[in-house]
Image (cartoon, rainbow, N blue to C red):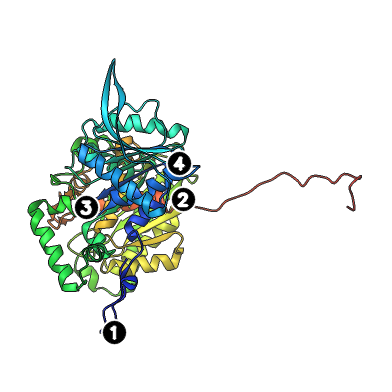
Amino acid sequence: MRQPESTSPAKRTTEDRTPMALLPYQQRWCADTSPVKLCEKSRRIGLSWGEAADTALLAASSGGMDAWYIGYNKDMALEFIRDCANWAKFYGLAAGEIEETEEVFVEGDDKKSVLAFVIRFASGWRVTALSSRPSNLRGKQGRVIIDEAAFHEQLGELLKAAMALLMWGGQVHIISTHDGVDNPFNELITDIRAGKKPYSIHRITFDEAVSDGLYRRICLRLGKEWTKEGEEAWCKEIRDFYGDDASEELDCIPKNGGGKWLNRALIESRMSPYTPVIRYDQSDEFGLLPEPRRAAEVADWLANILQPLLDGLDKTRTSFVGEDFARSGDRTVIVPLLQQPNLALKPPFVLELGNMPFAQQEQIMKHLLHGLPNLRGVVLDARGNGQSIAEAMRDEFGAEVCEAVMLSENWYRTHTAPFKAALEDGTLTDLPRDEDILTDLRAFELVKGVPRIPDTRTKGADGKKRHGDAAIAFVLAHYASRELNTGPVRVSSRKSPRRSPFTKGY
């Protein structure tokens, strides 16, 4: 934890400089009591040391359990068990000496002995650190800690064996730096963010660890005085050491992260020729007309083109909307989604506006939102000038329905995975079979391991510029269906029961 700067020229005492035993990111990890939790992390930030602190307490507790640490070599196993022993001494817990023994694991029809280091606690529980990666934990119970999971052979088989421990109240902790995009560890992270796995996920970069006091702690251990200049020089030295690998080793960005994020076959499999794209473009001269004339012209378009589409919608369905805003150059794309009886999401149409004045975009958006059945959630792109329309819609429909989103790397990291999962499992379907829509969705690229729309622009079928506009609108609409899918709760009950004459008056 960061300590306040001293206002006195005298050096701070050791007591004043001594922070809490665990740094904030270590505390957050230990405080998470989820049955299964995963951490993608920077190298050498002491998370395994923090895990040892929690594991020693667990094994020493009368209501605790055994713990099984699985590293990928003898040195890792020995280091973890020594950390547990040191924490036991720090806590004043009763524990035996470190034992070196062998655990027998069954691999198919064969029995395989694995070197292990064990600490036995007075509680009757023990911590066992294994020197290799047994895929069979049958018959074991307790907490399983898989350290540097990305570097384990057959991680899938190991996880399958570990998850069996959950049946009897066990825990599974997965910790690792990255080892490429196509690694089972990174695929597991993607599944968690997509909502396919109900696990807890943590992400700790090198910069976040330093911000939480990592270098201050190192200075404390070495007996050095912390300075801002010293911290900056140390961080530069670390990054220089890792060089081109720094993004993966320190920033939690798996390598080989370039290329298209959504493949053409997947997108086309979720397209329908019966979902129209309604495009409404205006000329530069239109923007120079008096606003009442512009409003009247747009009102005619709404009555003749948009309203018949709204009238034909199933009024029992629930609606969600995502909008990517543009004034000129790019296009404003509005994607409504209707939730079907099987909970799948389908767009009844997609609306694109080109070179449309602000006032008329607001006019069109209000008409659309008022006309959609059972509107539950609207998410609007609030970057730049889009913030104005987002604010107007929030004022019109309420903050509980309308949300303004500032798209960022962290937002993309968190919310693109569920969108892709929805395409893969068919819960988002019937996208327009349209060349420009396909191009926009294909524009998603993995940039530093995060799916996002790059700065480069493409040309639509009409020769006008596009910037993944429909793709962003679809992601925002899907986000609305997940995060804003609330509505009024209607409670019905039977008539109040009649009082018995025997209890009347009591």
Of badges 4 and 2, nearer the viewer stands: 4
Q: Which mark is residue 373?
A: 2
Residue visible at 43% across and 52% down in the picture: 372
Q: Between residue 173 and residue 477, name the one nearer to us.
A: 173
Residue 268 position by quadrant: top left
Earlier residue among tags 3 and 1? 1
Mark positioned earlier in the residue sequence (4 or 3): 3
Residue 175 in view in this figure: no
Badge 3 marks a residue whose secondary structure is loop
Question: Residue lying furthest front in this view?
Answer: 97
Disc 4: which residue = 122
388 versus 244 height, above or below? below
Q: Give how far across and how far down residue 85 sits, in percent.
A: 33, 46
SS of the residue at dot 2? Answer: loop
* Residue 239: numbered disc: none
Is 334 displayed left or right of 72 in the figure?
right
Tell me the tag on residue 8: 1
- State how far apart marks 1 and 2 are (Cα): 66 Å
First of labels 4, 2 by sequence position: 4
Q: Identify the mark nearer the N-term, 1 or 4.
A: 1
Front position among marks 3 and 1: 1
Q: Earlier in the sequence, mark 1 or mark 2?
A: 1
Which label lies toward us, 2 or 3?
A: 3
Give the x, y percent position of residue 276: 30, 45
